[in-house]
Amino acid sequence: MVFRRRDRRPPLRAAAEFLWPRGGWGRAFLYVKHRIRRLPDHPERIARGIWAGLFTTFTPFYGVHFIVAATIARVMNGNMLAALSATFFGNPLTYVPIGVISLQTGHWLLGSQPVAEVDDTLADKFLAAGWDLWYNVYAVATGTPVDWTGLKVFYDEVFYPYMIGGIIPGIIVATVGYMLSVPLIRTYQQRRRRKIKAKFDAIKKRAELEAVNSPHPPRGTQPPSRTPKIGRTE
C-alpha cells in the first residue's frame, strides 16, 4: 500500500518522529512536494486534491484529517493522494497558529468573546475533551453516571468557533495553494516528459549507431545467401 513502511517503528520513536521527523520538517516538506509533483494525473485534478488537503488543516477534526481530506477530494473529483499529502501542511509547527487564527475568526464571526490565552490552552482543551469523551463512553458501557458538561463547554468555547472560523482562512489558503499548484505542476510535468523523451531518443540513437558500426549483423538477422554459379559444361 502507499505510505506503508517496510520496517515497523517502536511507538516512542513514531511519536518522536511525528513531532520532529528525521532530517527536520524542511526535508519532510520537500519529500511531500516531490511526491505531489510526480503524481501521474492532470494538474487541475492534483491541485483540487491539494485544495482539499489544505482546507482540511483548518478544521478541528484532529485525528481524522485524512478521512476529511479524502472525502472533500472525492466530492471535488480531486486526486486523493494529493489531498492526503497536503494535510501535512498541518503539523506540530503550524497547529497553534492555525488554531489561533481559526478561533479568533470564529469568535469574531459569532460575536462571542475568545477564550483567554488560547495559544497556551488549545492543546490541553483538545486533550481534555478527548479524555471526557472516552470517560463517558466507558460510563455508558458500565452503567455509571455520565457527565457531558466538559464536552459542552469545549464545544461552545473551542470546537464550534474553530469550525466556523476555519472556513474563511481555510478557503483563502487552499485557493492560493490551488492557483500556485496548477502552473507549477503543469510546468514540472512538461519538463519531465521532455527529459524522458530526450533520454529515450538518445538511447534509440545510440542503439542505431552501434548497429551501424558493429561488424557483426544484428541478432536475429541472416546474412544474404550466395547462390553458387553453375558453369556450362561443354
Image: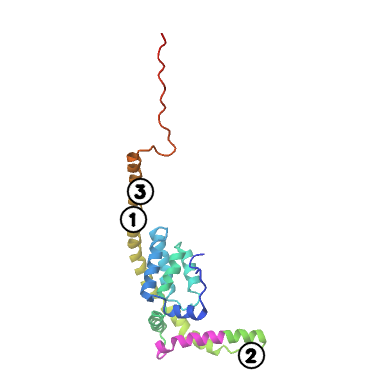
**Type of residue at label 3?**
Ile
Q: Nearer the viewer, residue 176 or 83?
A: 83
**Type of residue at label 1?**
Gln
Residue annotated with mark 2:
145
Horizontal and vertical percent position of residue 163: 45, 78
Could you tell me what secondary structure mostly forms the magenta stretch?
helix
Looking at the image, residue 143 sits to the left or right of residue 190; the answer is: right
Horizontal and vertical percent position of residue 154: 49, 86
Q: CA distance from mark 1 to mark 3?
A: 20 Å
| Secondary element type, mark 3 | helix
Horizontal and vertical percent position of residue 47: 39, 64
Q: Mark 1 or mark 2: which is in front?
A: 1
- Residue 233 versus residue 163 in the image, above or below: above
- The magenta stretch spans which residues? 113-133
Crowding at dot 2, Cα within 10 Å, few <14 / some 14-19 / many 20+, comes out as: few
At 48% from the left and 74% from the top, the residue drawn is 65
Whether the magenta-drawn stretch holds residue 105 is answered as no
Between discs 1 and 3, the one toward the N terminus: 1
Residue 84 in which image quadrant: bottom left
Residue annotated with mark 3:
203
Residue annotated with mark 1:
190
Labels 1 & 3 near each other (Cβ < 8 A): no
